[in-house]
Image (spheres, rainbow, N blue to C red):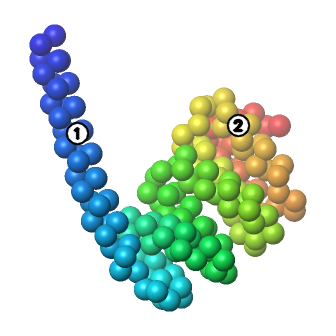
Amino acid sequence: VLGFINSDKKKSAKIEENQNKDEIKKNIEQKEVDQYPSNPNDHFKLAEGYLLNDLNKAELAFENFISTYKDNDKVVDAEYWLGRILFMQKKYSQAALAFAEFNAKYPDDKRYEQVSLLIAEATVEYAPKDFICKILIQTFDSIDNPSTKFIKKINQLKELNSCSKE
């Protein structure tokens, strides 16, 4: 029992140490926020550039872009990329929420079907098993004239998650 408690204390200390490191990193990244270009196009290009090599910086840059340039035409793209970044970081529940908000705000966006598919893919990663099949069916039913790619991917996800053919 003592070994378990000591092991638990070590784990707690390690977790706390990592949280402190994360906090310090966030503070440093927050200071970088002030260094974003004042031109919205340059700011957006910088955020896009981070996509290739630093998803955390990309996430912060797009979040800052969205809050700084609320009325800019590129906010739609920034919100889309924010969802993609969360997905790439395997933050699936956050990604699904970001994508659901995206589709609710921009139902006429040409990426609606693609985003719906990303919601389904993200949900499969974190939702309870009995919930997944309902989500996949609902996602499939929500798209008028789905593409062949969409149908194939939803059917694949249904099969992987042992959903009955409905």
Q: Earlier in the sequence, mark 1 or mark 2?
A: 1
Q: Is residue 162 above or below residue 123?
A: above
* Quarter in which the C terminus is drawn: top right
**Residue at image mark 2:** 133
Report the number of numbered marks: 2
Distance Cα–Cα, label 1 vs label 2:
37 Å
Q: Amino acid at mark 1?
A: Glu
Residue located at (79% from left, 37% from top): 165
Q: Position of residue 157 (x, y in %)?
A: 65, 46
**Residue at image mark 1:** 16
Q: Is residue 149 above or below residue 160?
A: below
* Quarter in which the N terminus is drawn: top left
Place residue 53 in its image quadrant: bottom left
Return the residue nearer the eye: 68 or 99.
68
Residue that sits furthest to the right in the current view: 144
Residue at disc 2, secondary structure: helix
Task: Note whether residue 153 is visible.
Answer: no
Residue located at (78% from left, 44% from top): 138
Around disc 1, counting alpha carbons within 10 Å, would you say few (fewer than 14), some (14 to 19), or many (20 or more)?
Answer: few
Residue at disc 1, secondary structure: helix
Q: Position of residue 122 (x, y in %)?
A: 58, 50
Around disc 2, counting alpha carbons within 10 Å, would you say few (fewer than 14), some (14 to 19), or many (20 or more)?
Answer: many
Q: Amino acid at mark 2?
A: Cys
Q: Position of residue 132 (x, y in %)?
A: 66, 37
